[in-house]
Amino acid sequence: MKQTFTVIFILCIVHLCAGQATLMKVKNKTYKTTEGGNIKGQVGYLEVPENRQNPRSRKIQVKYIWLKSLAENPTAPVVYLEGGGGTSTWQAEDPQELTYWLELLKVSDLIFVDRRGTKDNKLEYRWKGNFPENFFVSEQAANLHYQNMAAAALKTFEERGVDVKGHTIESHAQDVHELMGALGIDRYAIFGFSFGSHIGMAAMQLFPDEIVRAIFAGADAPNQSFNYPRYLDRHIEKIAQLVAADTSLSQQIPDFTALLEKVMKKIATEPVTVTLRNPMTLRKMPVKIGAFGLALILRLDIDDYNDIPVIPRLLYTLDQGNTDILAWFVQKRLKYSLGVPGNGINQQLASGVDPARWATIEQQAAESLFGHAVNFPFSAVKDHWIDQSMSFDPSIPVETDIPTLFITGTLDCRTAVAQVDETMKGFQHAVHVKVENAGHEQAYWDREVNDEIIPAFLRGEKIKKTEVYYADLKFIPVTGAETGHPSLK
């Protein structure tokens, strides 16, 4: 389906029939690849109400970049929805990143859509009090501090005229729907990564007649907003097996799980102190770290292919009394104790967790070495945030006949293979590609997945190969001079 990049109306402004959304600052632009190639495109903003249910809601802007396919007869355009912070349009503006998307562009147009609320300072609350001394020491202290921050944040957002109720997966899906209508696109494919898949599945339920295909990498369904601790526990077992298979490493760490338990127990009773830089004041300060702090950084980084290799050294050196690597990881995560992202917190809590799932999570958390760290900070504030509802119940599993490609790394414990298998039960036409040794962040960047499997799926071809190998995982030795990870520099 060919689309034109003609600017709609003079002054580059289009009012949708519904009267709620407006295209703004639209202009044609050429984007560069690292090889000197040119990709024709269009950049603009969709202006929408922050809360469509509130007639006095402030207007916010959602940036998009629409890239023209290199194919003569492209398939339906692909709408990419980012995970994490939700900003994706930078990938078109970065030549190296854009180069990764060339094989997809040989099949379809590609539309990057930033998530509503990204780069909006009004949606960021910063803690103004003293640094919470025991935040990284105990789960209870972290929960209490985050609850206090959440209360202060809600008050601040209200004073700023921010309506956080507008930041839900339904609102995000509606943005995509209205953007496609404004661009004159009636049929499109969804490509969601991590929380982007959470939004993509909401779009499939709300606008099924518009979506021809869906691709989900690191899939996170609406009814899986809160994760099972057992996935992290099983991941530790998997890492332990990999360590045991490393003939050199296993001599110094004969039992990885036992080492983890030993270190967690040690710093639970005797927290360590490291010197870090306060990201707000830029001043150095002492930070105490106990078992909860270690659990938190592990759950955030232990399913990243780039971080896994240094985890055994982290635990080994910590057991020896060296906190250098630990300090690097905690420095990266200090923001958890000093701020509340209004859009990020609300979108997760709006999806919520049904009582049966939460009961299972609580049972598993009580038995897990990590407690509720796997769901922090959402577990801390789920009963201390505003009540809200959506037009559909996110706790009900998705059922659809839309052809869907799932991509999962076998070293992903955030959106584990078992979780995706659970989600797929409601998908009548789905295929699951598992990428061996890939973590949460790596699965869809595997060259075979990116260059062959995804384009083939978009062309409507049958996917025959469902197991792909990412790369060998090489652990960093636990002793000696090493520079193979940023924490060692």
Image: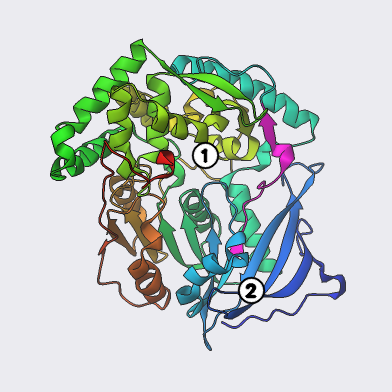
Residue drawn at point x = 59 percent, y = 24 percent: 284
What's the amino acid at mark 2? Answer: Tyr
Return the residue at label 2: 31
Mark toward the viewer: 1 or 2: 2
The span shown in magenta is 112-126
Quadrant of residue 120 in the image?
top right
Position in image of residue 459 (x %, y %): 41, 78
Q: Quadrant of the C terminus?
A: top left
**As drawn, 260 above or below 468:** above
Which type of secondary structure does the marked residue at label 2 adopt? Answer: strand
**As drawn, 373 above or below 347:** above
**Camera-nearest residue between 166 and 107:** 107
Picture colour scheme: rainbow
Residue most extreme to the bottom: 72
Instruction: Estimate the spatial distance between the alpha carbons at disc 1 and disc 2, rounded to whole Å.
Output: 36 Å
**Camera-nearest residue between 35 and 367:** 35
* Left or right of 65 on screen, residue 79: left
Residue 227 in sight here = yes
Residue most extreme to the front: 481
Return the residue at label 1: 351
